[in-house]
Each structure stands twice: as structure tokens, then as C-alpha cells.
């Protein structure tokens, strides 16, 4: 009997939990035993095509939406790790790494966590700080990123909480801002007003004075989002605490996770799921049109687009990355299948970096990974801060994209021949694991390379003259 790829158990488990169905209930609906379903969810049994169709039908999604990218992400993370100098003499091949991820993903993930700790300790030794004080890296940030990734960036309890509050706000006034102020006053006895806060402070919540102050220099969309974030901490605290309690986050990560989940609530409150999904489909994911419709920022719309994973009512599976001009990635999430660097800078050929050369313009790129997968990527450079005289500004680039098969659903693909391979830009995960030796932007050699130098010629890339360790 034909079988599908085996690594979709995590996706089935996530959908089941989001639907609040027990293993026994789902197994009964599928006509299999609970123990067999448990083995499938833990990737210990392959799932046949007929059963795959049943599962997809049960959750009201297309069978293709069940394809899980956890293994490919794990492979990418492990390749990054084994590309570190500490493994320079290990002579591991890419196939060795793929075999580990496929045969024992649990061990693979343990290796990733172990390397995270090693990296924190190594950097702390170099900087003289403790691992928890190390400003260059903090394991909690990756832990929270993994937590969001494992949930598919979809939290139904927060969606429900936001919908309840939104209903009350809309009942109070036709104006969302006025309705929000009325809700804060009626439910929490809080007054919200702009104020001249100190530099660097966007919002201040004073429970004693019963007021929320937002900096008078914030844009309207930033001020409202900031208040919605505070409201999330107040009205969805039970749901947030339950999500964190059910997670396996390390001791220092819940504070960051609580902030991320309050931001999720804020996005769901300002951009309710069904109206937002409808807007995405009507405009074909035209971010700037959706901005104006919901009075939100470019980044807020992009972030919300990645959360559209409601079973049976899902949007395009997207990836999101945010980076600064130094290449530091501060947000990363991928449902598209593209791998976003965990431990090193991403590829300079990726348009999320080129966007800095064309600020305030949406840059479009068909990105092709070394293995041949193609992705449709858009990116835009934005500026934050600088609302006061001589105030510093933050320059960031927001990248959003999907697998090439979904590109026609995005307005930015209009006029492009998506089948033309010559329009693809070759990119990689990172120089140390990228096999493209002739890349003129290569900053590091591939891990399993040694060099020879022909003094009679000079290649555009010094590393083009490298040869493999095992040659």
C-alpha cells in the first residue's frame, strides 16, 4: 500500500489539541485504536493514504496541509550546528545529518538544545558575563521561538478571548478607539491617555492611579496596539498562563512567552480572524490595503497573516523573518518550509537583506534553496522610533513568503512567470553549510572544505578553489 511521508504526527497532534479532542475520541472517529494514533502522533508509525484522507476530512483541511516541515527544520538546525568550528574535524556529511533527523528526531532536538546551552556558555566566557546576562545570545529567545513554531503560531484560546472582547468593544461604539476606551473604563476602571513619557518608554500601566499612558510620540497604530497588548495581559491572563504551564519552556523563558502571547492577543483583537482572513483573500494578501482597512502597521499585518491556521479556515502557510541591518534575526517563524537560520546569519542573497537598499518599497524575489525548493518571498525595510529630535532610529527588514505553489494567491506575483527557473535567485541557509562554492557573496568556507590556491588566477570568490575534505 502506498504511504505518505512519515513525519506528520506532530501536525496531527497539534490539530487535535487545537480542536480540543482527546486521542481516544479522534481514534474512534478515524476507526483506529488510540494506541495506534499515539504511535502516529509520535512519528513511530507511517500513515497510509486512506487514513491521511480521513484525518484531513476530520479537520476540514486539504491533505496537503498535513505535510509537516518539522523534520526539514530539524535538518537545517542540525546542519547549522555541525557547521560550527567545534565540529571541523568530525567529517560529517549532510546525509549523516539527515539520517539522524529521520531516524531519531528526539535525539536530534536534544542535540539542538545542548548546542544552545553550549553556545550560551561559550559566549559568556568570551564576554565575561554569566550565561543569563549574555546580551549577545539568550537561550530563552530560541525557546520561545520554538514554542511558537510548535504551536503553528495559532492559539485558539487567545482567538476566542480576543473575539469576546472585540464584541464588547464594538457594542460600546462604532469607533474602535472610543469603544476600547469605554471597555477599559467599564471593565477595569482604567483611563487611557497619551502622555509625555521618558525616551524609550512606549507605554506605562499604573494600577494605583488606574491609568494606561502611551507615549505621545507613538503613531496611532502603535499606540492602539500597545494598549491592546496591555489589555491582553489583563483579560487573557488565564489563557496565557495555561499555555505557558502546558509548555516545556525553560525557567527564564515564560516572561518572554507571556509578552509574545499578549502580542498575539493584541493582533487578534485589532484584526479579528474571519474579517482578516476575508480581507487577505479579497485583496490577495495586499499588505498595504489591509493596513488601511484595519488601521495597523505593515509588521502587524505580516505577523497576523502567519497566524491564520484555524482548522478548515486556514490561510496560506507563510514564513516570517525580521532582521536588523547587522543581520541579527529577532523574529523567525516558518510554515512555508523555508529554513530560517537559528545560530548564524542568513544568506545575503535573500531579499530580506536587499530590502535595506530600497527602503519603503516591497521587494519581490523567487528564492531557490540548494536542494531545489523554491519560495516566493517579499520584503520591506521599515524604520521605527525617531519621533523626537535627534532620537535614534531602528532600521529593520520584514520578510514574508510562501512556497512557490502558493505564490499565485499573492498579488505580488502578478506579472511574474513563476515557472521560469531563470527568475529564481539561488540562496542558502548559511555559508558554512551552503554547497554553492562559486557564490561571490560567500563569507565563510563550507564546513567540509579545504583549500588549494592557484596563484596564476584569482577567482571572484576565494572559496571557489576549495576542495572537499574527502576528495
Image: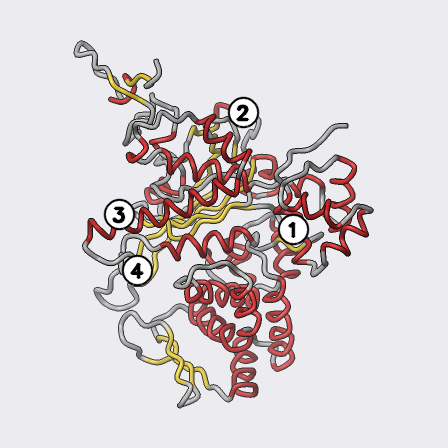
- Give me the residue at 22% from left, 57% from top: 129
Tell me the quarter of the picture where residue 140 sits. bottom left
Answer few, some or many: residues within 10 Å of disc 4's Cα (few below 14, many 20 plus, some between 14 and 19).
Answer: some
- Up the image or down, 34 lies above or below 258; here it is above
Circle 3: is it few (<14), some (14-19), or many (20+) Cα within 10 Å?
A: few
Q: Which comes sooner in the sequence, label 3 or label 4?
A: 3
**Mark nearer the N terminus (2 vs 1):** 1
Q: Quick one: 73 or 226, which is closer to the camera?
A: 73
Of residues 109 and 288, the one nearer the viewer is 109
For the residues labelled 2 and 3, the Cα–Cα distance comes to 45 Å
Residue 271 placement, left or right of 385 = right
Q: Secondary structure at mark 4?
A: loop
* Residue occupied by mark 4: 132
Earlier in the chain: of badge 4 and badge 2, it is 4
Measured from the top left, where is residue 283 in percent x and y? 60, 51
Q: Residue at x 40, y 90 (%)?
A: 209
Horizontal and vertical percent for residue 205?
A: 40, 80
Which mark lies nearer to you, 1 or 3? 3
CB contact under 8 Å: marks 3 and 4: no
The secondary element bearing badge 1 is classed as helix
Is 322 above or below relative to 1?
below
The first of marks 4 and 1 along the sequence is: 1
Category of crowding for the residue at label 2, using alpha-carbon neighbours closer than 10 angstroms: few (below 14), some (14–19), many (at least 20): few
Of badges 2 and 1, the one in the foreground is 1
User: Residue 441: x and y, percent?
Assistant: 30, 29
Q: Which residue is mark 1?
A: 13
Q: Is residue 386 above or below residue 227?
A: above
Viewer-closest of 208 and 256: 256
Q: Which mark is residue 420?
A: 2
Residues marked 2 and 1 touching at CB (< 8 Å) = no
Looking at the image, the residue that sits furthest to the left is: 455
Amino acid at each position: 500500500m502506498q504511504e505518505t511521508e512519515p513525519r506528520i504526527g506532530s501536525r496531527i497532534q497539534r490539530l487535535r489539541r487545537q480542536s480540543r479532542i482527546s486521542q481516544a475520541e479522534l481514534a474512534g472517529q478515524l476507526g483506529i485504536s488510540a494506541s495506534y494514533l499515539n504511535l502516529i502522533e509520535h512519528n513511530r508509525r507511517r500513515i497510509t493514504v486512506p487514513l491521511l484522507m480521513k484525518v484531513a476530512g476530520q479537520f476540514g483541511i486539504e491533505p496537503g496541509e498535513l505535510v509537516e516541515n518539522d523534520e526539514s527544520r530539524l535538518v537545517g538546525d542540525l546542519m547549522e550546528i555541525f557547521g560550527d568550528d567545534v565540529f571541523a574535524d568530525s567529517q560529517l556529511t549532510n546525509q549523516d545529518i539527515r539520517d539522524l533527523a529521520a531516524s531519531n528526531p528526539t535525539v536530534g532536538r536534544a542535540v539542538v538544545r545542548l548546542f544552545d546551552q553550549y553556545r550560551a556558555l561559550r559566549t559568556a566566557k568570551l564576554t565575561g558575563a554569566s550565561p543569563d546576562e549574555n546580551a549577545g545570545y539568550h537561550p530563552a529567545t530560541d525557546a520561545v521561538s520554538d514554542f511558537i513554531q510548535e504551536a503553528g503560531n495559532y492559539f485558539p484560546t487567545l482567538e476566542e478571548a480576543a473575539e469576546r472582547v472585540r464584541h464588547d468593544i464594538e457594542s460600546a461604539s462604532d469607533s474602535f478607539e472610543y469603544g476600547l476606551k469605554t471597555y477599559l473604563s467599564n471593565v477595569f476602571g482604567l483611563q487611557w491617555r497619551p502622555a509625555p513619557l521618558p525616551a524609550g518608554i512606549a507605554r506605562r500601566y499604573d494600577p494605583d492611579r488606574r491609568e494606561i499612558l502611551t507615549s505621545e510620540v507613538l503613531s496611532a497604530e502603535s499606540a492602539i496596539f500597545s494598549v491592546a497588548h496591555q489589555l491582553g495581559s489583563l483579560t487573557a491572563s488565564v489563557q496565557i498562563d495555561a499555555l505557558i504551564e502546558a509548555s516545556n519552556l525553560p525557567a527564564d523563558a515564560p516572561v518572554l512567552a507571556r509578552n509574545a502571547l499578549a502580542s498575539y492577543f493584541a493582533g487578534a483583537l485589532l484584526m479579528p480572524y474571519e474579517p482578516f482572513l476575508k480581507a487577505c483573500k479579497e485583496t490577495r494578501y495586499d499588505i498595504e490595503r489591509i493596513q488601511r482597512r484595519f488601521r495597523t502597521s505593515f509588521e502587524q499585518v505580516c505577523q497576523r497573516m502567519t497566524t491564520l491556521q484555524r482548522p478548515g479556515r486556514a490561510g496560506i502557510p507563510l514564513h516570517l523573518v525580521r532582521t536588523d541591518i547587522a543581520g541579527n534575526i529577532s523574529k523567525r517563524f516558518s510554515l512555508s518550509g523555508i529554513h530560517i537560520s537559528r545560530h548564524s546569519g542568513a544568506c545575503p542573497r535573500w531579499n530580506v537583506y536587499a530590502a535595506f537598499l530600497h527602503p519603503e518599497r516591497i521587494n519581490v524575489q523567487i528564492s531557490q534553496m540548494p536542494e531545489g525548493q523554491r519560495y516566493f518571498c517579499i520584503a520591506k525595510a521599515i524604520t521605527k522610533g525617531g519621533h523626537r529630535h535627534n532620537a535614534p532610529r531602528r532600521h529593520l527588514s520584514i520578510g514574508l513568503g510562501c512556497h512557490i505553489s502558493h505564490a499565485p494567491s499573492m498579488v505580488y506575483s502578478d506579472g511574474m512567470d513563476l515557472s521560469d527557473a531563470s527568475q529564481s535567485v539561488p540562496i542558502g541557509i548559511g555559508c558554512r553549510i551552503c554547497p554553492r562554492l562559486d557564490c561571490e557573496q560567500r563569507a565563510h568556507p563550507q564546513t567540509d572544505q579545504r583549500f588549494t590556491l592557484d596563484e596564476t588566477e584569482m577567482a571572484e570568490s576565494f572559496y571557489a578553489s576549495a576542495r572537499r575534505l574527502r576528495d
